[in-house]
Image (cartoon, grey):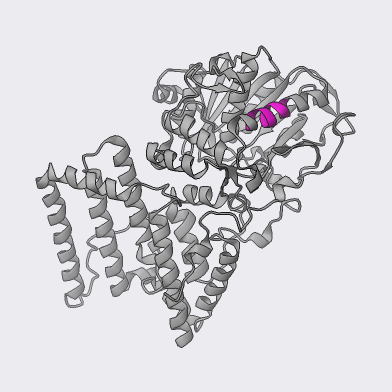
Amino acid sequence: MDQNVNATEALSALNRRLVEAVLKPLANGGGPDVAEVFKSLTAGLAQDTGRWFEIQNRYYQKQIQLWASVSAPAAEAAPTPVIAPDPADRRFRAREWQEPYFKYLLQSYLLRARWLSEIVDNARLETHAKKKLVFFARQMIDAMSPANFPWSNPEALKLAAETRGESLAQGLKNLAADLDKGRVSMTDERAFEVGRNLAITPGAVVFENDFFQLIQYRPATDNVYQRPLLMVPPCINKYYILDLQPENSFVRFAVGQGHTVFMVSWRNMPLSMGNATWDDYLEQGVIKAIGTAADICGVEKINALGFCVGGTLLGSALAILRGKGHDPVASLTLLAAMLDFCDTGELGVFVDEAYVGRREQDFAAGGVLHGRELALTFASLRANELIWHYVVNNYLMGRTPDAFDLLYWNGDSTNLPGAMYVYYVRNMYLENNLRSPGRLTMCGVPVDLGRIDMPAYLLATREDHIVPWKTAYASTRLLGGKMEFVLAASGHIAGVINPASRSRRNYWLNGNLEVDPERWLAAAISHPGSWWTHWSAWLAAYGGDRIAARAVLGSDRYREIEPAPGRYVTEKCDQRDPGRSLSDLAPTNS
């Protein structure tokens, strides 16, 4: 019994600290300025006291009604719930939540959640402050769910009783393992290993510098397109999102279509690279990769693809090259990427002048933004699914999460140079300078996206909370060439990584690029299956002639350095680097 009590106390202490961490969703002041937000909220409520009292009175009446239903004598039929959870909410589906005490806890929580949501919805605040408040309120609502705590989760308590405390003991073991890793496990990491069953498309590193390794993949067909395809993934995660298990690998698909594929594998930046700049990533990264791929294949032009931040970097690099009079790319593919940062979705809640100014001071002398900080940011956007679900499953229930390659990749975070990061958040997220011709000078060249005049394939995903699809659509007003805009179903990752072999989901096409994205969608035609096959047919027109596949990778100038996936992708974040980790949240004796 004492062991169970101690385990429960330890898990409760962890939860209290996790609540604190999620309510302050970014280290170093990155979250909403709570004091200022609530000061503004109070001022707004004072302007409409009638509405405030209406919300308060309804809340109190419902709580009294709930208490009356609990304290009333037992009836033959169960009373109608005062409030019920959303049927889609997986947290409260178990029958244990229908037991009287836990049913009361659940309904009381739902009433408090609705009360807070109504206050926030009716707050009279300027737009950015309102977004901050909405975000903060949702974090609070998600964090305070009774499902998240061992003493108020009936499923966890029942399992602890049935296993005589073994589930809690195993939960503490899981917690100890996660403390070592510095993060909450989202998948069974024993099931995956980069180079063993992830990132295993055959190839070799043919170039490297301090910023990236360039991987060239071995051909899978006797004949290949003359022009190679260069993929530029986001630098805030590892490249193998595009080369997961073979059945999910976009790289393997492209190689199988007859393309000579090159991949940029960004370096996980050490502290010594903390002063590297956005221009360095362009000149020593993307532009160098374009030239190397063309040189190896002996062609004047290649095809280029950028995913997420990789697309922003690629677009910037192409604008520089076109500004210098160079034309090394025959076609451009952008996957869930932003060039116009007019609406950055929920990520925008973190970025204002105060935040950017603080981070500029933080990195004035160099340093890296630790990958764990970025991981916590993205997880906080979907806290129930990406934080609390795993806290309950791993620690309260003592279970091992399912094996899922996407979530393994999601937990494999990378560091960014502080100088590069603050340039990016100021000039893109905060000031949206990239869309304005000549406002930014990169690598000594005034940048004008309108100079990017090669054919472009722009993919967005309809449920994307990182790159809202209408923001991705805004790129159609910036680029200068002929464009194909495609909207895929699902979200930022699942909508992109949708293997053609499975023929899942759908995508929308409309050749008339309306100014209003909603009008474009209203007239778009839905097509079943994966967008991969549509993209492949589009890209074939820009591949050039078919030639015999090369037996040897690289060239006389660029020799094979090591087999794919290379060293850079296997480097982990140094646990000694700064950045909030799970160990910061460990229970203490205080």
Q: Is residue 368 left or right of residue 291?
A: left
Where does residue 133 sit, x and y in percent of width and height? 30, 46
Magenta span of residues: 281-290
Which image quarter is the C terminus in?
bottom left
Q: Residue at 48% of width from left, 29% of height from top?
A: 427
Q: Is residue 84 left or right of residue 270?
A: left
> Is residue 289 on the magenta stretch?
yes
Q: Is residue 243 left or right of residue 342?
A: right
Where does residue 370 sit, x and y in percent of width and height? 56, 49
Corner quadrant of residue 471: top left
> Is residue 425 on the magenta stretch?
no
| Identity of the residue furthest to the top in this view | 325
| Identity of the residue furthest to the bottom in this view | 1
Q: Can the viewer see residue 349 in this picture?
A: yes
Where does residue 68 sit, x and y in percent of width and height? 16, 70
Q: Residue at 82% of width from left, 32% of height from top?
A: 221
Q: Residue at 38% of width from left, 71% of height from top?
A: 96
Where does residue 511 sit, x and y in percent of width and height? 52, 18
Q: Is residue 472 left or right of residue 114?
A: right
Corner quadrant of residue 152: bottom left
Q: Residue at 24% of width from left, 59% of height from top?
A: 111
Return the residue nearer the eye: 579 or 75: 579
Return the residue nearer the eye: 26 or 390: 26
Residue 522, placed above or below residue 8:
above
Corner quadrant of residue 366: top right
Which image quarter is the N terminus in?
bottom left
